[in-house]
Image: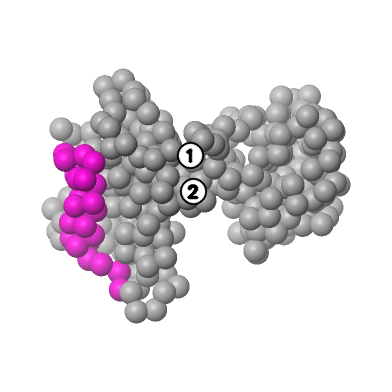
Amino acid sequence: MMLQLPRPYLLFLGATTNPVLAKTALGLKDWAGPDCVAQWCLPGGTVNTGLPEMRPAEAHAAGARSIVIGVAPVGGKLQPDWVEPLVEALEAGLDIVSGMHDRLESSLRIAETAARLGRRLINVRTPAPPAANGTGDKRTGKRLLTVGTDCALGKKYTALVLTRAFRARGVPADFRATGQTGIMIAGEGVPLDSVVADFLSGYAEALSPDAAPDHWDVIEGQGSLFHPAYAAVTLGLVHGSQPDVMVLCHEPGRMHIDGVEGYPIPSLSEAITDYVRAARLTNKAARVAGISLNTSALDEAGARAVLAVATAETGLPAADPIRGLGLEALVDACLAG
């Protein structure tokens, strides 16, 4: 039931000049560097990942097996000036991987070329069949799920850093992706925000199957229990992943659910209580091991201060995994017990 991507990648940047729009390509370079062969910019493009510049035929000869659309224009639309370059990639032997809202098949030229050449058009936001209901059956191995007081505050990056930290200690661990960028980084996963609600927990179960007793699946969180639009996907992921450990992600200073008026951010203590209550439907031993804070808006002194406040409030270790502050103590708490 997991979507699997053909790697290594050629990163397609189009003619973009805005690094913010190229966050997919830049994230892949940072987190899946060994799977990135080269980049390809169209004339006028200025964003640079630091990878060699190659056209599709050259990249294919260097080992690339797919071209990834590494930019995300507003609205997630397939751009008209991308069609012929993507056709060139298909003709060079590459499949196409896209996280766009527009499906690749919406371009008749791309669809016909792919069909003629037997190439794959992979829309990452489309879950792989078959769909299945969750069972609640206990699985072997251990699972960590990142959860949040809101959306877009560091659940993916926290999971990626913790996976690396576990491996650095010799602990077998795999990052399990649940969103389009995470799937591109991992090379496989489930786009949970595109799954029919009845099957959310079933897909989450398939995402982290039976494993060795000492193996950890570190699962990328989605949404938030406290978001009026996205709580459903969060709850399905919590129930299906059956986490032994959760890490609560939070951005200090964020007072209300982003983009939604009238919904305040809960306290850390309230959030911990609600996540543990939800998780214990399918794992009676589920616990929150610590707090991950996004302190990107603060200097280091401010970051250390809010970490201390979070620990004082919850009695749990608090860290900013991206800065590395408090990370070892957070890892200790996750692996304890």
Along the polypeptide, which appears first: circle 1 or circle 2?
Answer: 1
Question: What is the x, y in percent for residue 91?
Answer: 85, 33
Mark number, residue 31: none
Q: Give the range drawn in magenta.
A: 264-287
Badge 1: how crowded within 10 Å, few (<14), some, or many (20+)? some
Left/right placement of residue 171 relative to residue 336 reads right
**SS class, disc 2:** loop
Question: What is the x, y in percent for residue 17?
Answer: 72, 59
Q: Which amino acid does label 2 sit on?
A: Val
Question: What is the x, y in percent for residue 13?
Answer: 72, 49
Q: Name the residue under label 2.
A: 195
Proximity of marks 1 and 2: CB atoms separated by less than 8 Å: yes
Residue at 63 percent across and 55 percent down: it is 101
- Residue 321 in the image: above or below residue 309: above
Kindly tell me whether residue 128 is visible in this rendering: yes
Q: Mark 1 points at which residue?
A: 131
Residue 113 drawn in magenta = no
Residue at 39 percent across and 40 percent down: it is 133
Q: What residue type is labelled 1?
A: Ala
Kindly tell me whether residue 48 is visible in this rendering: no
**SS class, disc 1:** loop
The front one of 248 and 306 is 248
Question: What is the x, y in percent for residue 282?
Answer: 23, 41
Left/right placement of residue 224 relative to residue 43 reads left
- Give the alpha-carbon distance from disc 1 to disc 2, as whole Å: 9 Å
